[in-house]
Image (tube, grey):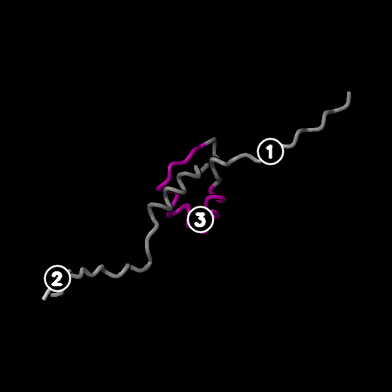
């Protein structure tokens, strides 16, 4: 009986990444990721495999996103023409 050709697997959305993939997606080394980022994340364990949920990475980025330069303070101008004097 001839073997039926295997159906190709369609691309599927990824819910988790390996630590190496998570580090690469954040643009950092695996060592830096494991020391500074991973301790703040919830992870999924499967045997010895540590999987990082993509939404945990997104939350980490949002929590740590900062402006490099503070915007200048807003100056209030009084409408009576006295400029506060």
Q: What is the CA distance from the residue labelled 3 to the residue labelled 2? A: 51 Å
For numbered disc 3, what is the local secondary structure? helix
Residue 26: give its label: 3
Residue holding disc 1 = 10
Decide if residue 45 is on the left or right side of residue 6: left
- Left or right for 7, reference 60: right
Q: Which residue is drawn at 14% across and 70% down?
A: 80
**Marks 1 and 2, Cα distance to the nearest angstrom?**
68 Å
- Label 3 or label 2, whichever comes before in sequence order: 3
Residue under label 2, please give it.
80
Q: Distance between the residues labelled 1 and 3?
A: 26 Å
Q: Is mark 2 on a helix, strand or loop?
A: loop
Q: How crowded is mark 2: few (under 14 residues within 10 Å), some or many (20 or more)?
A: few
Place of residue 74 in the rendered image (x, y in percent of width and height, measured from the top left): 25, 67
Between residue 48 and residue 79, name the one nearer to us: 79
Is 1 placed left or right of 71 in the picture? right
């Amino acid at each position: 009986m001839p073997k039926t050709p295997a159906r190709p697997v369609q691309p599927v959305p990824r819910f988790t990444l390996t630590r190496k993939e998570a580090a690469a997606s954040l643009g950092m080394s695996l060592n830096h990721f494991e020391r500074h980022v991973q301790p703040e994340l919830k992870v999924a364990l499967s045997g010895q495999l540590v999987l990082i949920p993509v939404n945990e990475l997104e939350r980490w980025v949002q929590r740590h996103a900062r402006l490099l330069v503070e915007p200048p303070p807003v100056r209030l101008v009084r409408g009576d023409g006295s400029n506060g004097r």
